Image (cartoon, rainbow, N blue to C red):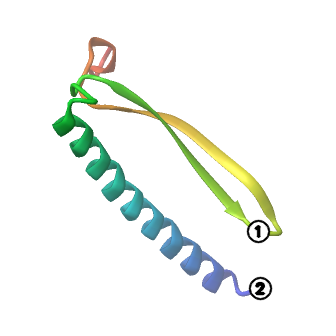
Amino acid sequence: MDQDVFNLDLRKFLKRFGVTAQREIERAVAEALENGTLTGSETLSVRATLTIPEILGELRIDGEIGLARTASSEPGT
């Protein structure tokens, strides 16, 4: 295996995933704000799922995305 090729292609994939995911999340949030599904003060639960057929069944990464600062998210609290 050529480690340099692997690392470069992996970074390209992750960058593409990150940029695409951010764009789609921003679009979905803007649409939800516009139609009143969200108020803009929520914290959204998120999950990313990654699979690599044949070698990685399913990797799940869970997290939260806040739409506004709360007292507990202020720096220093």
Residue matched to label 1: 53
Question: Between tags 1 and 2, which lies in front?
Answer: 1
Q: Is residue 30 left or right of residue 64?
A: left
- For the view shown, which residue lies furthest in the front direction? 35
Q: Nearer the viewer, residue 54 or 77?
A: 54
Mark found first going from the N terminus, 1 or 2: 2
Q: Is residue 58 left or right of residue 15?
A: right
Q: Residues within 10 Å of mark 2 (few under 14, many from 20)?
A: few
Spot occupied by residue 48 in the image (x, y as percentages of width and height): 55, 48
**Does residue 12 sit above or below 18 in this rendering?**
below
Measured Cα–Cα span from mark 1 to mark 2: 19 Å
Residue 1, numbered label: 2
Label 2: element kind: loop
Label 1: element kind: loop
Spot occupied by residue 57 in the image (x, y as percentages of width and height): 78, 56
Q: Residue at x 69, y 60 (%)?
A: 51
**Does residue 26 sit above or below 52 in this rendering?**
above
Q: Residue at x 39, y 63 (%)?
A: 20
Q: Residue at x 61, y 51 (%)?
A: 49
| Dots 1, 2 in contact, CB < 8 A | no
